[in-house]
Each structure stands twice: as structure tokens, then as C-alpha cells.
Image: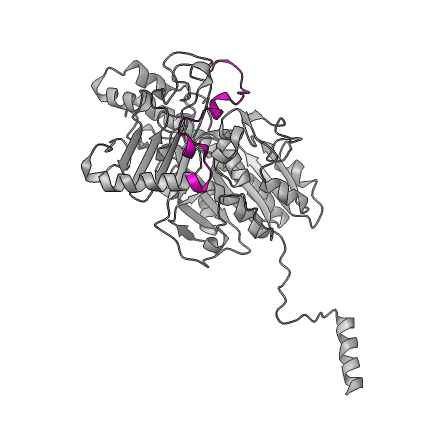
Amino acid sequence: MKTLCLYFLLLAMLTGLHFKPQNANPIIKQPNILFCIADDWSGDHASIYGDKTVSTPTFDRMAKEGVLFRRAFCASPSCSPSRASILTGQYPHRLEEGGNLWGSLSVRYPNYTQLLEKQGYLVGISRKGWGPGNDTIGGYKHNPAGQRYSNFEEFYAQKSPDQPFCYWFGSTDPHRPYEKGAGEKIGLKIESVQVPACFPDVPEVRRDILDYYFEVQRFDKEVGEIIQFLEQKGELENTIVVITSDNGMPFPRAKANLYDLGTKMPLVIAWKARIKGGKVINEMVNLIDLAPTFLEASGLKVPKEMSGKSLLSLLEGKRKENLEKVQFLERERHAYVRPNNLGYPSRAVRTNQFLYIANFQAGRYPAGNPEFIYVVGEYGDCDNSPTKSYMIENKHKPEVANLYTLAFEKRPEEELYDLEKDPSQLNNVIGNPTYAKELDKLRAMLRKWQKQTQDPRYINPHDTRWDSFPYYGGSGKID
């Protein structure tokens, strides 16, 4: 018997067999991470969401091979704070200067790219990473999203054979300015545009939307080129692919606003090695959930500071969707468009049926002052555009007057929208007694969240810290 045991032991050694305890976990290769983020792309503006004008074959393909989210939201509808919250998994109000546009981000807040780099990942970015803002004053040696490369091929060439990578592709599409007429030049049809109800339905606006769609399609094409490269290298199978945006379209009452056009994001997550494709998720999620998802998928511990929750169990079908889930949204200072560089602080609760917004400085103009202050131009929190110009120039027309008021004039301290009756969020029912009980409930939910997440505005709704943080952007009008 002893001789027989020695024979089998020798045979195992010669054939490379390895005996492991039955309970031992198999070694799983860490996934690559390809994070593709558009600049100012609203949710639903992809062909797979039902948009009849824009064509997004790459996004649609990844949705079919992965998971499509129908109700994803950014934490803040402004570039820098949204990107900061994605990197740190925290709400912007927890990041001090990181809660503003053209601010800074401190290294003291755990960042998923840093954590992965410490574990041996090759980390890099191309084009727009975190920002706009001061990359290094917060203690970083480069952009907080990673070391900069000219393109994905240059980045990939630096990778060791078995080294996992984490790459941030930050397009500047569909950020303005646009090439006028670009959408029509490639065959997009003006008559097929579904104009959001908060814009006048006129040819000028329809053509502006077509030019926006032109850049959405260009972003989709460039993401497709990276995915094709990964396929050729045999890397796509074990790569987590995320395609999303930082905030909504650069139009009135969208970007820099807490309405759905500003905060609802397109989102696809695919990981062929581990996630079954073709799934659609209707649960509300937030982009702050991405950092803990990446860390858990890579086998790393999620820092306790992160407010977001990993989506991995939801992606793998190990837990059911929570369709009653609530999202919390916020904004502080966007551009320098009010005297003394003041912001427009707001917080919001988004449920299945309601959107409740608390405006803490209702005496200020939500889109910036009507006159030029420091940057952009009149109503400078709204990017200059043909749509904006048309609304301002025609504000006295009956069909435009109310839309102009909703986009640019001062707002009440509280807003409440019944999304079942008013999905475009145009009719504020805050004074309607029918909604009194629901309003009290939403107010309490907001206060509880503010307390739990240590929002300074829980103690003092008129806290001035974000007004006094440095603004690192340049001055001048932007056409």
C-alpha cells in the first residue's frame, strides 16, 4: 500500500496535477477594466433605448452582450463633480473642492484607479479624465483618473503579458461647440427628431439636436474601435466594459440641472467571462456604484468611505432588482456665472413616481445671471447654443415664454414633479394639497440621506464653503 501511494504521488508530480482541499477557491484572473465615458450625453439617446434618429451600434452591441441599465443616474449633472464621484464612489458633497466644476480633487479620498494601480494594474487615460480643474493641487502627480496616453494602442503597448489593465477613455463628445449642420451632412433626418418637451419644437432646435447626435455617434464609433482592438488581442472576454456619460446634454434645463435630462445616464456594463448577456435592469443605480463594482470584481476590499454599492451581485443575477430604490442627486457651483463666483446649491430625491428638489439659494438664477459675469455669457451655466439663443431671442412668443421661464428664470425653494403624469418635469405641484403627504415623506428622505452622508447642508442649508473654493477656469465669453 505504501508503495502504491508513492507511485501515485510521483505520477502527480510528473503530470503536473495539483491536489487542493475541496473548499479551496479557484484562482480567478483579475479582469481588465475599460471605462468609456462620454461628455454631456443624456440617457435614452441611444438606438437600443428606442431613439429613432441616433445610431449607436457599439453601445447596442455591448448591451446585447452585457447588461443594459434603463435607470442609471449621475451623482451631479456637472463634469468635474460627476467624474470625481465616479472615481471615489462618494457623493460630491463629501469631496469638498471636488463638488465644484473647475475645482480640484484631493488624494485623501480613496480612488479606484489608485487602488488598482497599487495592486499591479496598468492604469491610464486618454483625452478627458477627471476635470475640468486643477489636476495636481490636490496631491496627484497627474490626472486623478490616471497617467495620460495619446491613445489605447500606446497604453496597451506598456502592458506586461499577464498584467491586468484599467483604462479610462474620456471622449470630449458630445460636448459643445458643434459643427453646424454636421448631423444633416451624414444623413440624419430633421423630421425624425423627438424634441424634448422643455425645448421649442422648431427647425433651429431640431438641427441643434442632430449636431449633438453626430457627436454621440462619433463617440460610439471610437469606443467600437477600442473594442475591436481588444478582440484582436484576445482580451475582450475578460474585460469589464462600461459605456456611460458624466452628465446630460448641453442644452437648457438639461446639463447642470437635477431634472432627468441632466442626471439620467446611458449605461451598459459587459463582462463576457462572468456576466450573462442580454439582461435589462430597471433598478435605479448611480454612477458612484461603479468604483466599488470595479474593486469587488478585482478582488479588492471596498473602502468604507465609499457611498456607492457594488453592482456585481445584481449583474450576476445573484440578487433581485429593487424597483423601490431611491436615488439622491445634487449640485453645487458649476461655472463662474454669478457675482462673487456664487453657485446654485440644490439636492434632490428621485423615486419611481416623484422628483423632489430643494433649492437652497432660490434667490439666485439657476442658469447663471442674465448678464455676462466672468465666463460663458448670459445664463452661463447653460452652454451657448442655437437652442439657447432661440429661446432667449423668442422669449416673448407665447409658445416659448413658459419654456424660457422654466430654463432661465428663478425657481422656488422647492420643486415637486409627478413623473407618472408629467415625465418631462414641467409642472411643479409643490403647492398642490393632494401631494402634501408625499412631500413630507420626500423631505424626510432627503434629510435622512443628508445626515447619513454627512452633508454640510444638513446642518446649515446655506453653507458657503463651495462659494469660496478656488475656481481654476479662465475668464471670457465662450461662443
| Position of 168 relative to 14 (above/below) | above
Q: What stretch is highlighted in magenta?
A: 451-478
Q: Is residue 188 magenta?
A: no
- The answer to whether residue 226 is visible is yes
Instruction: Name the spot of residue 185 as percent of width and height, x first.
Output: 42, 25
Quadrant, the N terminus:
bottom right
| Position of 94 relative to 375 (above/below) | below
Q: Quadrant of residue 206?
A: top left
Residue at 39% x, 54% y is 321
- The answer to whether residue 51 is visible is no
> In the rendered view, does 50 fall on the left or right side of 39?
left
Instruction: Name the spot of residue 403 as percent of width and height, x first.
Output: 27, 23
Residue at the bottom extreme of this rendering: 1
Numbered label tally? 0
Quadrant, the C terminus:
top left
> In the rendered view, does 71 fall on the left or right side of 307?
left
> In the rendered view, does 23 fall on the left or right side of 312?
right
Q: Quadrant of residue 347?
A: top left
Depth order, front residue of 293/451: 451
Residue at 46% x, 40% y is 453
Depth order, front residue of 164/374: 374
| Position of 163 relative to 39 (above/below) | below
Residue at 22% x, 39% y is 435
Scheme by which the image is coloured: one colour
Q: Is residue 463 magenta?
A: yes
Residue at 35% x, 42% y is 445
Instruction: Name the spot of residue 210 as percent of width and height, x first.
Output: 38, 28
Depth order, front residue of 107/180: 107
Instruction: Name the spot of residue 337 as percent of width and height, x first.
Output: 43, 17
